[in-house]
């Protein structure tokens, strides 16, 4: 990957968009415009932005309930994401999904799954369909360290490797499955080793450094497109905020959070590329977010008459 | 041309034709390839269609069912075979939380054209982890369609109907039916999903049933006819959606109802049917509705205990007579 200032600018802008967008979400949550669960990605932006950079519009994405960052980095319009969180019909899932279930057919964004590890089998199947139809595509599956404890993680890695599927597994290891540290739940805390045991090309990278993530993702996609089967990247990262808006954060030390905040992906990138025009992006993004909030505010609520829609396909859907 | 074939052969024929007609169709599950299918439904298909389309999976019900959902999202028409309904519980998360919800959660963007076939039912002395009838459970879930082919014709037709459906369809094949024989007319226009069929017309009492209990009910109906009780037997065919119209029409005709279901009574599809009749046709009833269901025990191994637990023609006859005693 040829790193240059243009790319550094692009990365910074996308990460800043996620950061500021989510800060606005918190504000909207406290104003009770957004309800339900709200899981923030702040601190982990380098992972989503770095990985998405390696993809084309033909590739597919499966993500978790902490997926605002992936959706924004993929190019799901901020207006539609904010409207979704406001529960409006103009939202990317017509207000039926909310924060945890963002979907967007146009960008091949397949959600937004809130059952930990539940998206892995789906990604395996999508990659299987690409292999069967001989389509030159990659399916990317994001999941957290918590998913590693689920049987579906192991079942899915086995299938992906056995069938040599074009799939990129991105493990966002932020050290905690909700409020329980990985060290209390896993006999082996190096997750990339588990993937390697399924004979998957596997590595562990610094998930706070976007250049490292982007480089690893680009190499992985190239390998996958060469027909070498799945690649697994464990990104070591950290969420700066609580698990959700209901989390009092009693399980981790403030000094630990402070140490990780020194590795803030935005700060690190700016240190490496001092030419990034932060002020310009702050201004641009403030406008985008204001517009998203206005769009969501002005959105309409779906008629209750349509409540039972989308349980089954309308006639003629194929 | 009509032919007399087994239920197994009817499913096989439907499967073979579906794979020949649509290259998006493939079969995936435990032992479907080299072994030939645990009930020999796909025997020889591996040689016929190759390992790309007849896929032996590891014992990973959750992952291969989820992979079926993913492949359906990707434009394929997967048929996932789960060896028995009991094993499907290992894939319940994928069936319930993904297959049934994706269309709705995505605001109508992503439908899941997936077919899941599984064996169901008792009677083979396979004890309490291989013998249950949990199809009624699945009928609880919005987003799914639940089919229960009993006849040879339906064993053949329902797979094609399910594959043409844009949403997830579960097909429950009672394992005691695979060796049964009947007439197949491949040219017949299939009765659509969600339609029940009056299998035997009668005027005194309606039996509502599905799956293997259909044949036990028909046997009971023949015996009852000799005693002057003319029973109408309805094959529900589909537990979700249920054909309220056909049910209520029959209730209005006979005014007496017996439901025969190999599932348990509590919180069941038989209870649901009673509730619907109560809501929609209460004043048509001349006697309290009754049920013959599986006794509420995990299915035991010993043959006499297992047979005592399952619905049988004698129980159906006795219950029908009891209903007829009420004036």
Image (tube, coloured by chain):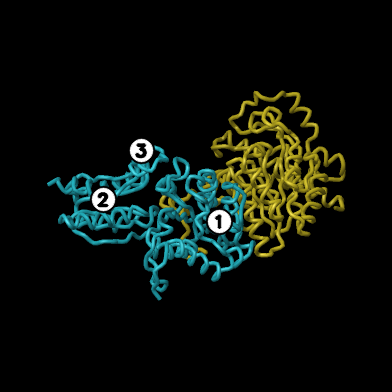
Q: Is residue A130 left or right of residue B118?
A: right
Foreground residue, B2 or A103? B2
Asked which quadrant contains residue A252, the reply is: top right
Q: Residues within 10 Å of mark 2 (few under 14, many from 20)?
A: few
SS for callout 2 = helix
Q: Is residue A141 left or right of residue B285?
A: right
- Residue B145: percent from the left, percent from the top? 44, 54
Residue, x 71% and y 33% (percent of image)?
A: A175
Against B166, is A273 above or below? above
Q: Which chain is cyan?
A: B
**Mark 1 or 3, nearer chain start:** 1
Q: Evaluate whether residue A119 shows in this view.
A: yes
Q: Colour of chain A?
A: yellow
Foreground residue, A142 or B178? B178
Chain bearing tag 2 is: B
SS for callout 3 = loop
CA–CA distance in space, label 2 to label 3: 28 Å
SS for callout 1 = loop
Chain bearing tag 1 is: B
- Residue B54: percent from the left, percent from the top? 60, 61
Q: Which mark is residue B280?
A: 2
Chain bearing tag 3 is: B
Which is in the foreground here, disc 1 or disc 3?
Answer: 3
**Mark 2 or 3, nearer chain start:** 2
Q: Is residue A276 left or right of residue B206?
A: right
Which residue is disc 3 drawn over? B296
Residue, x 82% and y 51% (percent of image)?
A: A7
**Mark 2 or 1, nearer chain start:** 1
CA–CA distance in space, label 2 to label 1: 34 Å
CA–CA distance in space, label 1 to label 3: 39 Å
């Amino acid at each position: 990957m040829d790193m240059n200032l243009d790319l550094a600018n692009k990365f910074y802008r996308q990460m800043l968009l996620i950061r500021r967008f989510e800060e606005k979400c918190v504000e909207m949550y406290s104003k009770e415009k957004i309800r339900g669960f709200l899981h923030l990605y702040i601190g982990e932006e380098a992972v989503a932005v770095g990985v998405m950079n390696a993809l084309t519009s033909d590739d597919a994405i499966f993500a978790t309930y902490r997926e605002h960052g992936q959706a924004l980095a993929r190019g799901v319009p901020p207006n539609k994401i904010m409207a979704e969180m406001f529960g409006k019909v103009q939202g990317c899932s017509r207000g039926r999904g909310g924060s945890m279930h963002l979907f967007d057919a146009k960008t091949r964004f397949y959600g937004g799954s809130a059952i930990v590890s539940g998206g892995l089998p789906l990604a395996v199947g999508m990659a299987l369909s690409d292999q069967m139809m001989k389509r030159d595509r990659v399916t990317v599956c994001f999941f957290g360290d918590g998913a590693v404890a689920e049987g579906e993680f192991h079942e899915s890695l086995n299938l992906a490797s056995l069938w040599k599927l074009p799939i990129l597994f991105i493990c966002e290891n932020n050290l905690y499955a909700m409020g329980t540290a990985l060290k209390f739940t896993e006999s082996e805390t190096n997750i990339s080793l588990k993937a390697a045991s399924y004979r998957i090309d596997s590595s562990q990278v610094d998930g706070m450094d976007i250049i490292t993530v982007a480089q690893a993702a680009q190499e992985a996609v190239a390998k996958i497109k060469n027909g070498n089967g799945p690649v697994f990247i464990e990104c070591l990262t950290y969420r700066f905020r609580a698990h959700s808006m209901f989390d009092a954060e009693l399980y981790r030390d403030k000094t630990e959070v402070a140490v990780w905040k020194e590795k803030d992906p935005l700060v690190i990138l700016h240190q490496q590329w001092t030419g990034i025009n932060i002020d310009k992006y702050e201004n641009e993004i403030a406008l985008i977010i204001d517009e998203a909030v206005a769009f969501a505010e002005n959105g309409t609520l779906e008629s209750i008459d349509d409540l039972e829609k989308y349980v089954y396909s309308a006639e003629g859907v194929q | 041309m009509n032919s007399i074939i087994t239920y197994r052969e009817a499913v096989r024929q439907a499967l073979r034709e579906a794979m020949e007609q649509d290259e998006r169709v493939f079969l995936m599950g435990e032992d479907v390839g080299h072994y030939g299918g645990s009930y020999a439904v796909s025997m020889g298909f591996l040689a016929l269609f190759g390992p790309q389309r007849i896929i032996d999976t590891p014992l990973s019900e959750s992952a291969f069912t989820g992979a079926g959902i993913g492949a359906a999202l990707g434009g394929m028409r997967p048929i996932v075979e789960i060896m028995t309904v009991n094993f499907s519980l290992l894939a319940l998360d994928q069936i319930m939380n993904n297959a049934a919800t994706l269309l709705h959660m995505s605001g109508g963007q992503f439908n899941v054209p997936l077919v899941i076939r599984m064996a169901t039912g008792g009677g083979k002395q396979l004890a309490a982890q291989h013998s249950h009838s949990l199809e009624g459970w699945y009928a609880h879930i919005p987003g799914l369609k639940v089919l229960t082919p009993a006849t040879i014709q339906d064993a053949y037709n329902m797979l094609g109907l399910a594959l043409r459906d844009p949403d997830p369809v579960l097909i429950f094949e009672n394992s005691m039916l695979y060796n049964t024989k009947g007439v197949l007319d491949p040219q017949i226009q299939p009765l659509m999903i969600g339609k029940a069929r009056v299998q035997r017309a009668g005027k005194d009492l309606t039996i509502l049933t599905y799956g293997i209990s259909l044949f036990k009910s028909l046997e009971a109906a023949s015996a009852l006819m000799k005693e002057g009780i003319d029973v109408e037997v309805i094959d529900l065919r589909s537990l979700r959606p249920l054909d309220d119209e056909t049910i209520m029409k029959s209730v209005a005709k006979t005014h007496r109802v017996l439901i025969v279901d190999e599932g348990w009574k509590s919180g069941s599809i038989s209870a649901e049917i009673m509730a619907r009749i109560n809501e929609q046709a209460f004043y048509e009833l001349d006697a309290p509705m009754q049920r013959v269901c599986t006794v509420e025990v995990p299915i035991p191994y010993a043959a006499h205990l297992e047979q005592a637990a399952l619905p049988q023609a004698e129980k159906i006859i006795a219950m029908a007579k009891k209903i007829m005693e009420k004036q």
